[in-house]
Amino acid sequence: MEEKIKKLINRMTLEEKASFCSGATLWKTKSIERLDIPSIMMTDGSYGLRKHTGEKDYLGIYQSEPATCFPSACALASAWDVALAEKVGKAIGKEGQSKNVSIILGPGANIKRSPLCGRNFEYFSEDPVLTGEMAAAWINGVQSQGVGASLKHYTAYNQEYERMTISAEIDERTLQEIYLSGFERVVKKAQPWTVMCAYNKVNGTFCSENKYLLSKLLKEEWGFEGFVVSDWDATNNRVDGLDAGLDLAMQGADGANDKRIVEAVKAGELDESVLDQAVANNLRILFKIIDNNKENASHDEEVHHAIAREVAADSIVLLKNEDGILPLNKEKLSKVAVLGAFAKKPRYQGGGSSRVNPTKLDCAYEEIVKLAGDAIEISYTQGYSIDNDNIDEITMKLARETAKDADTALVFVGLTEKHEPEGYDRTHMKLPSNQIELIEAVCSVQENVVVILTNGSPVTMTPWNEKAKGILETWLIGQAGGGAIADILFGNVNPSGKLAETLPIKLSDNPSYLNFPGKKGKVKYQEGIFVGYRYYDKKEMDVLYPFGYGLSYTTFEYSNLQISKKEMMDTDTLEVKVKVKNTGKIFGKEIVQLYVKDIECREIRPEKELKAFSKVILNPKEEKEVTFTLSQRDFAYYEEDINDWYVETGDFEILVGKSSREICLKDIVHITSNLNTCESNK
Ligand code: BGC
């Protein structure tokens, strides 16, 4: 392969090489007919394919081919199931293959720093391990179908405010531990065919020109073998970008950048070998695409819709279930009221470049009616308008009457697309006022209330969360979400999702609150490594629902934690075993979480950090043993004195539990660093 690439590059003119480093159109790369080099097509695809059918309408609101809309990353992450993420990736890859798409622009592996970020719905988690594991599995699924993925947006793109110019000011330790390590994990575990650099600057340098990020870390240290593509129009100075490691500038340019590259090489300002390297990186992936192209590939839309439903159900998080209000008991209930416009007009995906034109769309109301059968009468009232936040007294009166007249009320609320799209951030975490009013109104006349939330980012729930007996967080769960919600409500599926991000009580609790979204072109990440639960735990703060939390209709018991060593060198590995038993009466899935705590350290460290997890499938009374393997990096922090990861000699707690705030079992291992002091690693 490398020989073939070299020969081809030798046959290319300087102009051809330069032009091969930028796109031809919005979605396509350039072909060079003289040398039989074809063009390839890329499309968006964070949670489904967005194959554009027109050159205008950039956000593809009307003009993309129908494709399965799977749960978005915020939902999928709550499943904590790498096999499921791989299944979704595989299905999206299959759709890509059958639609002649070569590269799918996703997934987004940015860290959720603030609940206000407009694109949080496209990102997995506040934690880099969960982010990295889910994104890697997704990519492995896509790429198993012979289609490439583009891991994005590399890096520190955690807000929409001034997204094209803002500089994320981050100290090196924070960058490494929080904002890079997820990307690093994905590159090492899934080797994405492409990585998309972000629009923003990091510490003053555009990501698209950041040699440290693109070349030193991504390519040299992590061993990335594909090409780096710019986010659409993220290129600033093309020559500097090329020199930094930006192989392909998208979208298609007018040729001006190609000319600049040629001139820079001729003037001796850019070494031609740098250009050759970028061309080689682009060609390597191009050949991979050609080799993996499957003529006449097809997929079954119904099968993919069924996968979307399965994934959606496993992504839903049951936050509250007082008096066992769920699952709905068909024997006992005769009338259930469904309230809220989202029950009939679902909010199931985000807005912007990730937007999918779904092959079909299930609505919760119809699916509830289907599952209720003849046993339960289902009434419905809209409760609020999706188009505005106005409180309408007549609508509210009707809602009260409908709710009062039933045994149980299901209230569908959430954010509309205008509240959380790509392009701008939210300014608060509240639900629209007419929806809050609806919940309050229903709770005032009905004691059996279940609130079903649809939103891409956390919302504040006080004070109504005290009144509702049941709360389901369904996130944005894709085109089959309606059926999935009905499955959970009636117990056809036992909820098994857990929170991939902390739900704070209020916005001002969030660690980035005082420094979001920045000003004068800079956003200071002053909270440092203390993002999400790392902050709330360290500050011993109450949260609404903690990271890793989620209820089930069954119960689980943890026992027999065993660690393979009590003392070890940091270069050794540690095996951790734990038994988990389904102690309830129904089938269920439990997400077992392993955290590590460095008991004493010269640097401040989080109370605990997620290092591994496993979703275990258990029949009633069944018990399984889960095994995790931890190695050096799982105990290390990034030590700026040596610019490297470092394990300080001492005791480390191994914590295994049901959530970040429900640790069931712990043990201690003593680890000796292979360095006398961290100084000796210099
Ligand atoms: C977004 C990317 C997207 C690209 C192409 C950009 O504005 O940031 O996520 O892949 O457009 O649509």
Image (cartoon, rainbow, N blue to C red):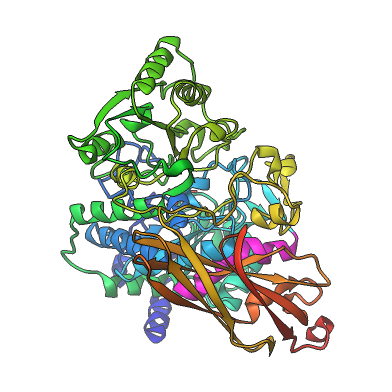
The residue drawn where x is 52% and y is 45% is 119
The answer to whether 31 appears left or right of 528 in the picture is left
Q: How far across and how far down the image is residue 434, in percent?
A: 49, 21
The residue drawn where x is 64% and y is 53% is 532
User: Compared with residue 458, is residue 97 higher up or lower down, i.e. above or below?
Assistant: below
Q: Residue furthest front?
A: 332
The answer to whether 364 appears left or right of 133 in the picture is left
Q: How far across and how far down the image is residue 350, in percent?
A: 43, 41
Q: Nearer the viewer, residue 629 or 197?
A: 629
Dominant SS in magenta: helix
The residue drawn where x is 19% and y is 37% is 373
User: Compared with residue 474, is residue 647 higher up or lower down, i.e. above or below?
Assistant: below
Please say whether residue 31 is visible from this viewpoint.
Answer: no
Q: Nearer the viewer, residue 579 or 168?
A: 579
Task: Determine which quarter of the picture holds residue 33.
Answer: bottom left
- The quarter in which the C terminus is drawn is bottom right
The residue drawn where x is 42% and y is 32% is 448
Please say whether residue 484 is visible from this viewpoint.
Answer: yes
**Which residues fall within the magenta stretch?**
171-191
Residue 186: say if magenta: yes
